Image (tube, helix red, strand yellow):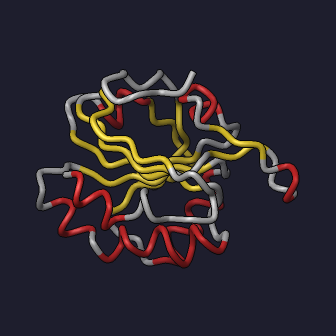
């Protein structure tokens, strides 16, 4: 079953890169008592994610935060080391990267996809959501993983 607007996020544990190396961060740690824009991409460094999707959030970060958003986070079914390298390569300062290495969060949301035909294995669908205190308030899921229109920064700003 796919998560819907009004639903609580499922409990999950992400991996984030901390000063001492990889660390765990729970759904509650990230979303409890906060307004967070969560962006999901099929894969770090993949063409649409790297060139079209993430750059809009990097560029429009200030505009998004000015709307009362506490944080912008990006999640992907990649390991924490890949997401850390991607964060640095894109200059995405101030955006949190949440590694969903085994795809547990994507599966729990019902927003996983099978990328085996492209040699990618299990991945997350491309989406953006506004989460308030753990509850989904806006959910924009792309019909095609090669597009970043409905889930892009401009579309999300309009929904805020």
Quadrant showing the N terminus: top right
Instruction: Evaluate whether residue 18 shows in this view.
Output: no
In the foreground, 18 or 64: 64
In the image: residue 11, left or right of residue 157:
right
In the image: residue 157, left or right of residue 142:
left
Q: Is residue 7 above or below residue 21?
A: above
Which residue is pictured at 36% across the width and 72% down the height?
58
Which residue is pictured at 32% across the width and 77% down the height?
59
Which residue is pictured at 50% across the width and 68% down the height?
87
Which residue is pictured at 50% across the width and 65% down the height?
148
Q: Is residue 9 above or below residue 129?
A: above
Q: Is residue 115 above or below residue 110?
A: below
In the foreground, 29 or 139: 139
Quadrant in which residue 119 is drawn: bottom right
Quadrant in which residue 34 is drawn: top left
Measured as percent of width and height from the top left, residue 47 is found at: 65, 74
Measured as percent of width and height from the top left, residue 156 is found at: 30, 57
Q: Is residue 13 above or below residue 44?
A: above
Quadrant in which residue 120 is drawn: bottom right
Measured as percent of width and height from the top left, residue 158 is found at: 22, 59
Instruction: Evaluate whether residue 41 shows in this view.
Output: yes
Measured as percent of width and height from the top left, residue 53 is found at: 48, 68
């Amino acid at each position: 079953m796919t998560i819907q607007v009004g639903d609580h996020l499922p409990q999950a544990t992400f991996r984030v890169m901390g000063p001492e190396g990889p660390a765990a961060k729970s759904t509650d740690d990230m979303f409890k008592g906060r307004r967070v824009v969560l962006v999901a991409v099929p894969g770090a460094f993949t063409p649409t994610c790297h060139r079209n999707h993430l750059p809009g959030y990097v560029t429009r970060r200030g505009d998004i935060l000015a709307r009362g958003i506490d944080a912008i986070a990006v999640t992907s079914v990649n390991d924490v080391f890949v997401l850390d390298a991607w964060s640095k390569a894109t200059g995405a300062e101030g955006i949190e990267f949440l590694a969903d290495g085994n795809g547990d969060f994507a599966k729990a949301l019902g927003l996983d996809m099978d990328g085996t035909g492209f040699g990618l294995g299990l991945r997350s669908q491309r989406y953006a959501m506004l989460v308030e205190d753990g509850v989904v308030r806006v959910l924009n899921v792309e019909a095609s993983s090669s597009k970043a229109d409905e889930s892009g920064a401009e579309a999300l700003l309009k929904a805020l």
